Amino acid sequence: MPLIKRYPNRKLYDTGARRYVTLEDLAALIRDGQDVTVVDHATDEDLTAVTLAQILLGEEKRQGYLPQSLLAGLVRAGGQTLSTLRRALDVPLDLARQVDEEIDRRLAALVHRGELTVEERTRLAAKLVPPPPGSSAEEDRLRALLQARGLPNRDEVQALLARLDELSAGLDEVLARRANGQ
């Protein structure tokens, strides 16, 4: 795990590679699956979360890839733990699944009442309800659609949620230490 020292002039130094790095360099390391630790050179205070926030801010300025609702949720969370925010992020995913199930249930009811044929139901379902995950055509279509709009795919969202869990655990630990006067 790369150890990055942050100096008072805000320069970042990778102690393992023995070179100065930029926030973009750190973002590339993280995208490559590496965990990094950023500490203050003088005090050894952990600045990893602050630095990750700076990376996200830079990405947002350049690409605007985070939904406004997520950013507003971060602001609203304030001093609360990130686990609250993670639960809030799970709600839209569950809602989409519920909508798909309701569409499927109503189409089945129309077939049962004789108002739709099985073939018509299949055609409508293909247009209204996405095929189950794992269908390569659907995966390719969704991947292209997300990429065209600059949105993260499922793997990226899962990685973000995993990182939120890690940050939440770290934040809970820091808050517990502060509460105990350490």
Image (cartoon, rainbow, N blue to C red):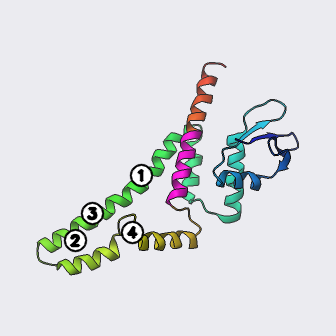
Provide the residue designation for mark 3.
Answer: 102
Provide the residue designation for mark 1.
Answer: 91
Rendered residue at 32%/75% (across/down): 126
Provide the residue designation for mark 2.
Answer: 107
Give the structural element (helix, strand or loop) at label 4: loop
Do tag 2 and tag 1 residues touch (Cβ < 8 Å)? no
Image location (x, y in percent) of residue 3: 75, 39
Q: Label 2: how many residues lie within 10 Å, few (<14), some (14-19) or many (20+)? A: many
Q: Label 1: how many residues lie within 10 Å, few (<14), some (14-19) or many (20+)? A: few
Rendered residue at 53%/73% (across/down): 144
Query: Hey, what amino acid is under mark 1?
Result: Val
The first of marks 3 and 4 along the sequence is 3
Provide the residue designation for mark 4.
Answer: 135
Q: Label 4: how many residues lie within 10 Å, few (<14), some (14-19) or many (20+)? A: few
Label 3 to label 1: alpha-carbon separation: 16 Å
The quadrant in which the C terminus is found is top right
- Along the line of sight, which residue is nearer the eye, 118 or 174? 118
